[in-house]
Amino acid sequence: MMHPIFQVDAFTDRVFGGNPAAVMPLDQWLPDDTLRALAMENNLSETAFLVRLPETDEADFHIRWFTPTVEVPLCGHATLASAWVIFNKLDWAREKIILQSKSGHLGVRRDKDWLVLDFPNLAFEERQTPDIIHEALESAPETAFYVPNDTNYMVVLENEAAVRSAEPDLRKLKSLGNQGLIITARGESCDFVSRYFAPGAGIDEDPVTGSIHSVLVPYWASQLGKSSLEARQLSARGGLLRCELKGERIDIAGQAAFYMEGSVHLP
């Protein structure tokens, strides 16, 4: 069997920037073992799989996301990449897409050459920073924020330079399992900056992570007293996000650059 596959760089306006994601539209769901094997073979931080839903359904597509090792409940950059594929490769005529996911219904709309994700506002809890994070990152403060619905910890560092220069011990962070670590600080040329590490989920450092902005945006909105925020992720590839807090939902906007398309051959 042959299945189409696309690769799109998300949260960037140029190829080789942002975060690359593989997108595979399917006629029907393949076995989970096959989905995991495909994601491992693609060896990108995320592979998104899409199945078109009936016209009578409230959503247009069912979407699932896999890292090279696990399925995840929410992913921003692969959703952005999937929307680009739907709009540009699947002849989607409407200005909005509704996606069914493990995190509920997600929306994506076109705004000129930007795509705007409608994502949930994720709750977070202040906790004492786990010892393993202190061991992995000496600059970690005494308190951290835990995101139960996205299995992440977030720590706030002193400034943008501290985020940019951080070199956490990935071998120690791997013991967090599928939990990731967000590091963030107030930005110099934007409202806030971040980086994201999840070695236990097969991602040493994610280039640009849309989903973590479901907790970053409400946190920084409360700190800065504003609802519209511009953010940068300070990985080597880098990415720009324009965000807006809208009560229980968050708009996360980014651009996308098309890289390649092809076919996957399965027995």
Image (cartoon, rainbow, N blue to C red):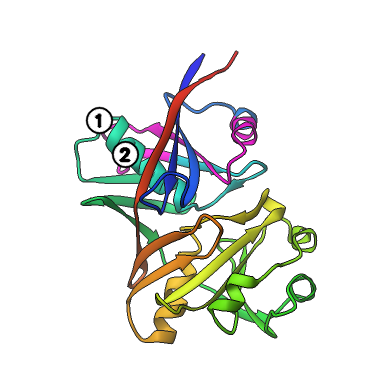
60 versus 158 height, above or below: above
Residue 36 seen anywhere in this rendered image of the structure: yes
Amino acid type at circle 2 is: Asp
Residue 229 vertical placement versus 58 (above, below): below
Q: Which residue is denoted by mark 1 in the rendering?
A: 91
Q: Tell me where residue 206 sits by quadrant.
A: bottom right
Q: Which residues are magenta?
A: 35-62
Is 233 located above or below residue 88 in the figure? below
Q: Is residue 66 left or right of residue 19?
A: right
Marks 2 and 1, how far apart in space?
13 Å
Query: Looking at the rendering, in which quadrant would you find the C terminus?
Result: top right
Q: Nearer the viewer, residue 105 or 236?
A: 236
Figure quadrant of residue 71? top right
Please state which amino acid type lies under the numbered disc 1. Answer: Asp
Residue occupied by mark 2: 60
- Under circle 2, the secondary element is loop
Image coords of residue 109 (percent x, y)? 26, 51
Give the residue at x 64% y 41%: 68
The residue at 67%/84% (across/down) is 141
Verify whether residue 64 appears in magenta. Answer: no
Visible in this render: residue 122?
no
Give left or right: position of 221 versus 180. Answer: left
Label 1 crowd bin: few (<14), some (14–19), many (20+), radius 10 Å: few
Residue 23 location (% of width, % of height) = 46, 36
